[in-house]
Structures are given as C-alpha cells and as structure tokens.
Image (cartoon, rainbow, N blue to C red):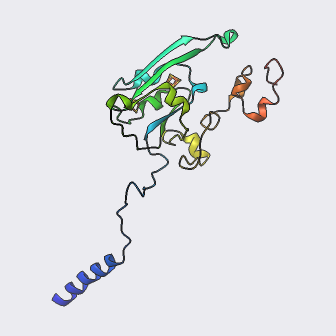
Amino acid sequence: MYGSGMMKGFGVTIRNLFRKPVTVQYPEEKVRQSSRFRGQEFSWFEDRCTGCASCAKYCPLGIIRIVTSPSDRHKQDGADFNIDVFDIDQARCMYCGLCVEACPYDALHMGTNFEGAQLRRQDLVITVDVLRKRAKHPSTWYRPQLERQDFDPYKQEADMQTVAREPYYWHPKRPAMLPESARKEATADGEYK
Ligand code: SF4
Ligand code: SF4
C-alpha cells in the first residue's frame, strides 16, 4: 500500500520531467493570441465611416471623441462628412468592444496588438491620423464575416471589402465602394449596371 503510493508519486515526477516547458520568454517569444483577441489597437476603415458617432455614444467611458464637418462629396446622395477628429483614449479603454458592436457600418473593429506602452499618458490617445495610417489587422471578434473568410489577422491585412457584412452592390453611384470586378463594369458617369 505504502509502496504503491510512492510509485504513483514517482510516476507523476517522471511524467513532468519530460513535459515541454510552458514558460515563454517574452518579449523575445510571444504566445499566439486567438484571432478573436480584443487587442488595443483599433482598425478603422474611413471609407465605411459616416461619422455618425454611435461608437462614441455607446462607449461606457466616453473616451471616443468625434468631430465632423460637411463635405462636398456625393451631394446628390445627401453628402457625407469629413472626419476631422477621431480620438480614442486607450489609457482608459477597457476593451469591452461596445463601440465596435454599436458601429452600424462595420467601420470600427478591435485590433489584435497588445503592445502599446508609452512613456506619457497623453501619447496613449489614438488619433485619426494614426487610425488612418496604421496597418489593418482587425480582430475577428464580433465579426462573423471575417470568420467565414477564415481571416487570420496575424497574417493578413484587411480592406474595406474584406470587413463588409454585405457587398456594396446596392449602392450604384459609388464605384469606389464596389469590388474591383464590379468597378470595371461601372459606366463612365458612375452608374453600375
Ligand atoms: S472598447 Fe469599450 S471602453 Fe474601449 S473605446 Fe470601445 S466602448 Fe469604449
Ligand atoms: S466608426 Fe462606425 S459608429 Fe463610429 S462614427 Fe464611424 S460609422 Fe459611426
């Protein structure tokens, strides 16, 4: 009885002796996150954004600031807005994703990065210029359309068509919003047939 208990104990020791170490030498090594990971850098697609500010209204912490001004574009369709300011204060962000859920046009997505340390608190504010320039690696969280495409944010970048729930075939006068194949079929005055 006593001996079998010892053998069991040794068995556990021997099994663990050959187990692969689980410690990761960060930052040299990184654990791969899930594609649904809600990372700290947001992916924003300006061409999809109307400036409606739903994301800002739904943020429980009120850390998104949007300022728009009327543009001269698409006046015949009711015009659209320039996005002059789109600040996200990630120092206070809790990555709940409610802003992403609230966006009616799939313009805003959680990102996948988690390394955004800064020396000064104010440098943690993500500005519209940063959002415009940064590579788009949207998380697949809350985006079944990305999962349907097996989109891998760690290997791929997304464009505004990739992140769309539906293709923009319904909008005949904006060839820029159509997929490349359909754009070729658009007539000179922008009518899609
Ligand atoms: S993830 Fe949550 S806390 Fe962060 S900006 Fe969006 S709604 Fe606000
Ligand atoms: S990101 Fe979405 S919710 Fe926010 S202003 Fe643009 S369209 Fe509206």
Image quadrant of residue 58?
top left
Q: Is residue 16 above or below residue 82?
A: below
Where residue 184 appears, x then y in whole percent? 81, 30
Left or right of 28 on screen, residue 50: right
Left or right of 88 on screen, residue 84: right
Where residue 54 appears, x then y in whole percent? 46, 21
Of 148 and 47, nearer the camera is: 47
Q: Is residue 22 above or below residue 134?
A: below
Identify the residue at image location x=63%, y=11%. Answer: 79
Left or right of 14 on screen, residue 54: right
**Quadrant occupied by the C terminus:** top right
Where residue 141 appears, x then y in whole percent? 48, 41
Q: Is residue 19 above or below residue 53?
A: below
Query: Can you see residue 93?
Result: yes
**Quadrant occupied by the N terminus:** bottom left
Identify the residue at image location x=42%, y=34%. Answer: 97
Query: Can you see residue 1?
Result: no
| Count of numbered circles on the image | 0
Identify the residue at image location x=45%, y=25%. Answer: 55
Image quadrant of residue 145?
top right
Q: Is residue 150 above or below residue 50?
A: below
Which residue is at the far front? 119
Where residue 63 appears, x then y in whole percent? 37, 25
Of 154 and 106, nearer the camera is: 154
Identify the residue at image location x=44%, y=45%. Answer: 37
Which residue is at the far left? 2
